[in-house]
Amino acid sequence: MQILIIKPSSLGDVIHALRIAKQIIDNIPDVSIDWVIKSELKPILEVSGMVRRSFVYQRTRGIRAYLSLIKQIRLQKYDLVLDLQGLLRSAFLLRCAHSQNKIGVADGREFSTFLYKSIGESSRKTEIHAIDRLVPFLNHLGVDNWNRELPLDFPKSQISPSTHQHIGEKGFILLFPESRRQEKVWPHFAKLSKLFNKNSSHCIVIAGNNRDELYPGTIDLRGRIHLAELPALIDRASVVVSNDSAPLHIASSLKKPLVSIFGPTSAKRYGPYPQNSEQNIILTAQEKNLETITVEQVSFAIENLYVDNPYYPE
């Protein structure tokens, strides 16, 4: 069975879609998956080991690049095409593909739902987790008894020699103090690292891209980790602490002990999955104000997971 998934972005959403793809691969014999993806996110598909072919989608390159993408897709024939993006351009790609079976998300925007058969929850206001919104695509394929606990493993993601020199062989607490939206950023990550430096022997590693704030006494890997390496780094951590951002979803997909911090966004819709896992602690701000989550609360959550983490090397 040949399937094309159209899900160019964003990274967290692509991780959600990969978890659905994993279920498809594990439940349907002889299935192969192609994917339409943004060029900067292509490495995450490559290290997942689940995607046969990636078609690069770059909206900023204009109409010529878009038409070239359509031409590449039309060279293939598919048993099923899934538009998990739900935008006009992604829906038009679906329409152009050679397939008798084309479906997309029911909550699509930009009138995209007029271009395909839609399934799933149509209201974006319903408090349904982002992954559960994709489950109807599994049901469409006859996958009904799927495993919510099934992790991703990113078999081709590896720690680079330079990163290994920094982190060594011991366990560590991995902090992701960033998010694409500033209002989702908990403002006390620096205070948290200082607290652990003062009162704990735990090793603290900082990852991300923004180097504006200083984290003395930590292993600072900001700006040094490529996307293909990120799952391997997260998998090495003893505990991960993250805002509502893509690293949170990677950590959740790997079943890592995870402290997630939520303010203006809904943890019920965008939090770790499944949310009843003993390895997840979700801290939700009062009245969506992240200042209400204290350093002591996050520290206590980390210590609870650190003690209970059976994967931590002694």
Image (tube, grey):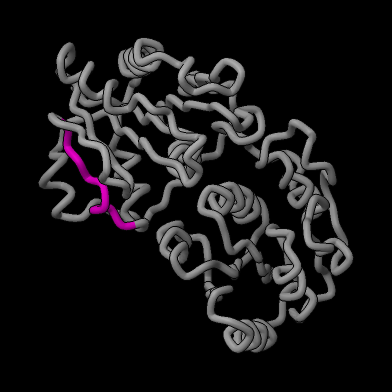
Quarter of the rendering containing residue 110: bottom right
User: Image check: 279 left or right of 140?
Assistant: left
Residue 206: image location, x then y, percent: 26, 37
Q: Is 139 or 63 nearer to us in this picture?
A: 63
| Residue at 14%, 53% in the rendered image | 162
Q: Is residue 121 above or below residue 304?
A: below
* 213 displayed left or right of 275: left
Left or right: where 179 falls relative to 238: right
In front: 94, or 48?
Answer: 94
- Is residue 245 shown left or right of residue 194? right
Q: Is residue 192 magenta?
A: no
| Residue 46 percent across, percent down from the top left | 43, 64
The chief SS type of the magenta part is: loop
Quarter of the picture holding the N terminus: bottom right
Against 282, residue 27 (above or below) is below
Frontmost residue, 258 versus 137: 258
> Measured from the top left, where is residue 81 in percent x and y?
73, 68
Span colored in magenta:
218-226
Q: Residue furthest left?
A: 165
Residue 224 is a magenta residue:
yes
Looking at the image, residue 177 lies above or below residue 122: above
Where on the picture, by quarter, is residue 43? bottom left
Residue at the image position 85 percent from the left and 69 percent from the top = 115
The quadrant where residue 101 appears: bottom right
Quarter of the figure that contains the C terminus: top left
